[in-house]
Amino acid sequence: MESNCLNSFAAFGLTEPITRALAQENYVTPTPIQAQTIPVAMRGRDVVGIAQTGTGKTAAFALPILHRLSTERRRPEPKRCRVLVLAPTRELSAQILDSFNTYGRHLRVGATLAIGGVSIAPQVRALAPGVDVLVATPGRLLDLVQNRALRLDAVNILVLDEADRMLDMGFIHDIRKIVAQLPVKRQTLFFSATMPQAIAELAGAMLRDPVKVAVTPVATTAERIDQRIIHLDRAAKPAALADVLRHESIDRALVFTRTKHGADKVVRGLAKAGIAAQAIHGNKTQPQRERVLAAFRAGRIKTLIATDIAARGIDVDGISHVVNYDLPNIPESYVHRIGRTARAGAAGTAISFCAADEVPYLRAIEKLIRTAIPAANRRPSRPAHGRPERPRGETPRRHREHRRGGEAHQRRPAPAPGRAKPRHDPSDLATLPFLQPAVRPHAARAPATASITGE
Ligand code: AMP
């Protein structure tokens, strides 16, 4: 079992044109599947990855492939491809092609699509001189092979994406036919959201000594947690936080800010409101952090303010509330933050403050978790003159509760095409001996021991 937890794309040693494209896409931190997959794939190992769409798995395989193509510059032979990516649907294939074009925009790498439902002639023409990367659905690929428009004997890297959907859609026989025509000496990267027995067997037959990687299905984590958004002015955040901490029944609250400076400011603001809190971030010494964390774990401090990076090493059970004082600009961070609560199946609450300029971050998060987070208006705080003040446009609490329950249900957007939820329970995989994941899903995590990593 291998684990590679790299926190920045620079650490992978990808070629400069690739890192430049990533910077243009505002990718700063690799997602967990990327951190685990990219280094081992770059070393040429086979990988079997359990990850859903939405976890960043496309870049997890596309980046090491583009790196290899750019370092081993060679013309593809006519009617051949060097990399074959198989996906179950036309939509997903098109998205994968887009990703290759995006990440490879500063490289001279040719990528093309072979999908059904459209004329085959342009695909035959595109393949005639040979291509670096071919993204295909299985049926059309076999048609092209049968028509002698394509040979599969020069494939160096095979990617099989969404293998469990391939099974559901009846493609397994086609996959076996395709694999039989590939060179035995190749690298194979195999991804599936779930690992039913038939898929585990297929992987077993296709892969050589694979590195196994797995990540928590993001939607599953998010669904166990009571999530709320509070829309407010930036200037109202300190009072809103004090309000939440006073009125919610909190065992332990972890409050996230974007910056270290912001974390200290929040501590000072809470102190003025008579609420004790401590900050944990990279400017604190290791003994300071250890002390704060021990107090938090023991319940002597109920509120801990942290930045994303400092929080990475905090592994504490019994966090009843996560508060996003600032919304993260990387949607995956939201899922990691809220995953700090609702550990081991416990209930948890995640409250996020969203100022007007953070609305685009909120939209990106909702897209990632495929859920519209219900907007809860802030519980009215009691001003000095004693009458509760209802912020403009807010409805009284009893109406709100009623509306929220209904809204949360109705506003859940349908999955985008090609991004449907898996039909199997992703937790099934943990029981299969073939796939004991390198990183266990959060829900299955053992009782916590606390540790801190540096910033
Ligand atoms: P995927 O699971 O590959 O479909 O990716 C889901 C979404 O996350 C896509 O919109 C990607 O552009 C985006 N994405 C993937 N990796 C990262 C990253 N490291 N940082 C920010 N966004 C990312």
Image (cartoon, rainbow, N blue to C red):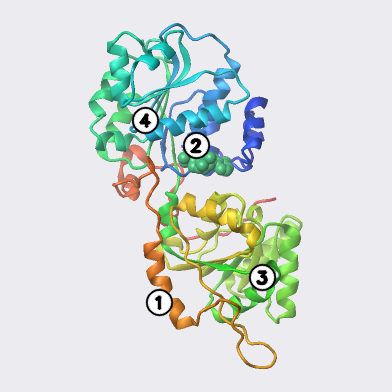
Closer to the N terminus: mark 1 or mark 3? 3
Of 209 and 441, nearer the camera is 441
Q: CA distance from mark 2 to mark 4?
A: 26 Å
Residue occupied by mark 1: 402
- 334 on left or right of 220: right
Crowd rating for badge 2 (residues with CA inside 10 Å; few <14, some 14–19, many 20+): few
Q: CA distance from mark 1 to mark 4?
A: 43 Å
Closer to the N terminus: mark 2 or mark 1? 2
Residue occupied by mark 4: 87
Residue at x 66%, y 34% (from the top left corner): 10
Front disc: 2 or 4: 4
Residue 409 drawn above or below residue 302: above
User: Total number of numbered labels?
Assistant: 4
Amino acid type assigned to the residue bearing label 4 in the image: Ala
Residue at x 71%, y 80% (from the top left corner): 273
- 366 on left or right of 323: left
Under circle 4, the secondary element is: loop
Closer to the N terminus: mark 2 or mark 3? 2
Residue occupied by mark 2: 2
Closer to the N terminus: mark 4 or mark 3? 4
Residue occupied by mark 3: 237
Amino acid type assigned to the residue bearing label 1 in the image: His
Q: CA distance from mark 1 to mark 3?
A: 25 Å
Can you see residue 297?
no
**Residue 242 at x, y = what percent?**
64, 77
